Image (spheres, rainbow, N blue to C red):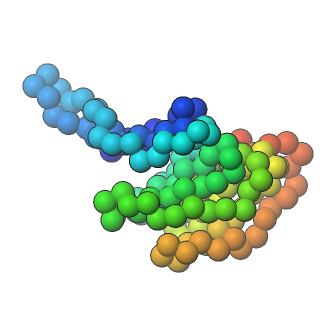
Amino acid sequence: MVFTGSADGTVKVWKREQQRKGKKHSLNQTLLQQECAVTALAIDVPGSVLYCGSSDGLVNFWELEKGLAHGGVLKGRKLAVLCLEAAGNLVFSGSADKTICVWRRDGNIHTCLSVLTGHTGPLKCLAS
């Protein structure tokens, strides 16, 4: 599967299918349709949770193991989420507010462990 997020406010799922002349990706479903832009996507290392950051400061997530069921929304940002990284049970969200929130996931519950400060500009990239 391939996941895409767009400035049109959608998150889409594409599936790879075998065709007579090779393989092709076709649209499988739309997970999210909202007014604000999707600005970041990340999948945790086991491949069980998809995270989506938006220009409204929210992070939606879906549980892949439960058939792409919407798991909830992480709140706490006032400005756009510009980048995401997920590693194990930790999720990092970088924002236009120049900070990084570190979240710990326990099932569907996400707790903000800390807020990292120190940048003088919006966070555009994260890697773990």
Where does the N terminus fall, quadrant-wise? top left
Using the rendered view, name the quadrant where residue 29 is placed.
top left
Label tally: 0
Q: Residue furthest left?
A: 20
Where does the C terminus fall, quadrant-wise? bottom right
* Residue 63, position as x, y percentages in the image: 41, 62
Q: Is residue 22 visible?
A: yes
* Residue 59, position as x, y percentages in the image: 60, 55
Image height check: is 121 above or below 114?
Answer: above
* Residue 78, position as x, y percentages in the image: 77, 53
> Could you say which is closer to the camera, residue 100 or residue 59?
59
Q: Residue at x 41, y 47 (%)?
A: 31
Image height check: is 43 above or below 89?
Answer: above
> Could you say which is closer to the camera, residue 16 or residue 108?
108
Task: Left or right? Give the position of 57 relative to 86.
Answer: right
> Could you say which is closer to the camera, residue 87 or residue 123?
123
Task: Left or right? Give the position of 6 relative to 82.
Answer: left
Q: Residue at x 54, y 56 (%)?
A: 60
Using the rendered view, name the quadrant where residue 35 is placed.
top right
Using the rendered view, name the quadrant where residue 66 is placed.
bottom left
* Residue 18, position as x, y percentages in the image: 16, 34
Q: Residue furthest front?
A: 35
